[in-house]
Image: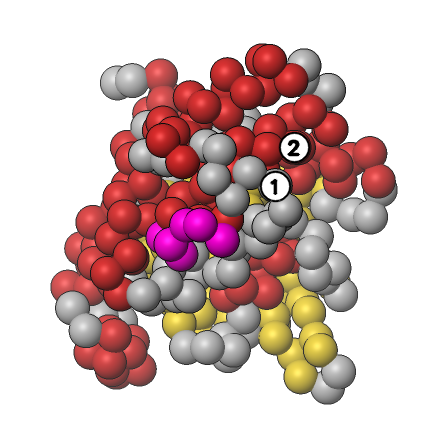
Amino acid sequence: MSANQLARGMPYIVVDQVTKSFGSHQVLKCVSTQFCTGEVTVIIGASGSGKSTLLRAINRLEPHDGGRITIDGVEVTDHEATLQKQRCEVGMVFQQFNLFGHMTVLDNVTLAPRRIHRTPRARANDQALALLERVGMQAHAHKYPWQLSGGQQQRVAIARALAMQPQVMLFDEPTSALDPEMVQEVLDVMRELARGGMTMIVVTHEMGFAREVADRVMFFDQGCIAHEAPPADFFGRPASERIAAFIGRMGH
């Protein structure tokens, strides 16, 4: 067994009875689950089922109303210093790439390490170039985001999240804003990360990716985790008509 597999199974993020409402609409209804080190969890479900809200609650972009979330044993709250540390440990990649348009690719990737970790510029540049190489974007280091395709921008966004050396990567529908022909290049980078043992929580509609890369697939329905299982079981023996219909709609 590799060291990675030995470390697997340790709960790194624990979600306990978490609730969240927007006005009178309850988006998360007493959600409890855990995400273990080295595990790739893919979360699927209809729009508005609470998938993205859970990701945003883990990163405190959306404060939860009730229950608790812990990251490596430390509760997620508004405590400034703790939150900054947790956001370094948990990288996030969004649907929209959120790159700074006035900065080059290289500067986008080095910004947080230089500001937050106080990494000297030369070292930050070296680390960023290595990450850009990893996502196939090193040749574009001195371009600006507007000079790149959507798929290229998303790969830069992944490199930027990795620059903080996170323990976990959250992906919130990272391919849904992309033209179909660019989806694969982003999923390929994510596959590589998964193969490298990165702990990942991925909200996506890409069923092929879920089948191939996930350790478990979680189905959200109306603010609850309706079902979770390893992909072979999840897709091979759908637990309900609703799940079977959803898989059918998304295509195999």
Near-viewer residue (196 or 233) = 196
Front one among 178 and 147: 147
Q: Quadrant of residue 89?
A: top right
| Rendered image: mark on residue 103 | 1
Residue at horizontal 84%, vertical 42%? Answer: 79
Q: Which residues are magenta?
A: 146-151
Rendering coords of residue 69 (x, y %): 66, 49
Name the image quarter holding the N terminus: top left
Which mark is nearer the camera, 2 or 1?
1
Observer-nearest residue: 42 or 107?
107
**SS at mark 1 in the image:** loop
Label 2: how many residues lie within 10 Å, few (<14), some (14-19) or many (20+)?
A: many
- What residue lies at 33% left-to-right and 57% top-to-bottom? 217
Secondary element at tag 2: helix
Percent coordinates x, y for residue 67 in the rendering: 71, 58
Does residue 206 sit above or below 25 in this rendering? above
Q: Is residue 182 above or below residue 3?
A: below
The residue singled out by tag 2 in the image is: 111
Residue 196 located left or right of residue 31? left
Q: What residue sits 61% from the left and 70% below the top? A: 28
Give the residue type that dot 2 points to. Leu
**Marks 2,1: beta carbons within 8 A:** yes
Q: Dot 1: few (<14), some (14–19), or many (≥20) neighbours within 10 Å?
A: some
Task: Give the number of callouts.
Answer: 2
As for residue 150 lying within the magenta part, the answer is yes
Q: For the residue marked with disc 1, what is the amino acid?
A: Met
